[in-house]
Amino acid sequence: MLTVQHLNVQYITDEDGQKQAVIISIERFNQLLEGIQDLN
């Protein structure tokens, strides 16, 4: 199971430093999709 620590996320922030988006690797993204598909 993936945890946030395993995702190695990077954040895109606005001018005020507020998180607006997350960047993860394609590999991790695909793992997340597989996990979601397994829930169905």
Image: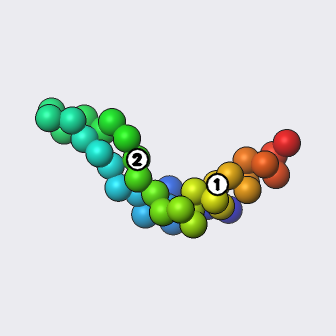
Drawn side of residue 20 relative to residue 8, left or right: left
Drawn side of residue 29 relative to residue 22, left or right: right
Amino acid found under the numbered disc labelled 1:
Leu
**Residue 6 pos. (x, y %):** 51, 65
Name the outermost residue toward the front: 26
**Residue 18 pos. (x, y %):** 25, 35
Say what secondary structure mark 1 lies in.
helix
Drawn side of residue 15 relative to residue 35, left or right: left
**Residue 34 pos. (x, y %):** 73, 56
- Mark 2 or mark 1, which is nearer the start of the sequence? 2
For residue 19, above or below residue 37: above
**Count of marks, rendered view:** 2
Drawn side of residue 27 relative to residue 31, left or right: left
- Specify the quadrant that holds the C terminus: top right
Residue 9, numbered label: none
Cα separation between marks 1 and 2: 14 Å
- Specify the quadrant that holds the N terminus: bottom right
Of the pair 39 and 26, the residue shown nearer to us: 26
Crowd class of label 1 (few under 14; some 14 to 19; many from 20; radius 10 Å): some
Residue 20 found in image quarter = top left
**Which residue sits at x=73%, y=47%?**
36
Which residue matches tag 2?
Answer: 22
- Residue 3 visible in rendering: no
**Which residue sits at x=63%, y=59%?**
30
Crowd class of label 2 (few under 14; some 14 to 19; many from 20; radius 10 Å): few
Say what secondary structure mark 2 lies in.
strand
- Residue 7 visible in rendering: yes
Residue 32, numbered label: 1
Amino acid found under the numbered disc labelled 2:
Val
**Which residue sits at x=25%, y=41%?**
13
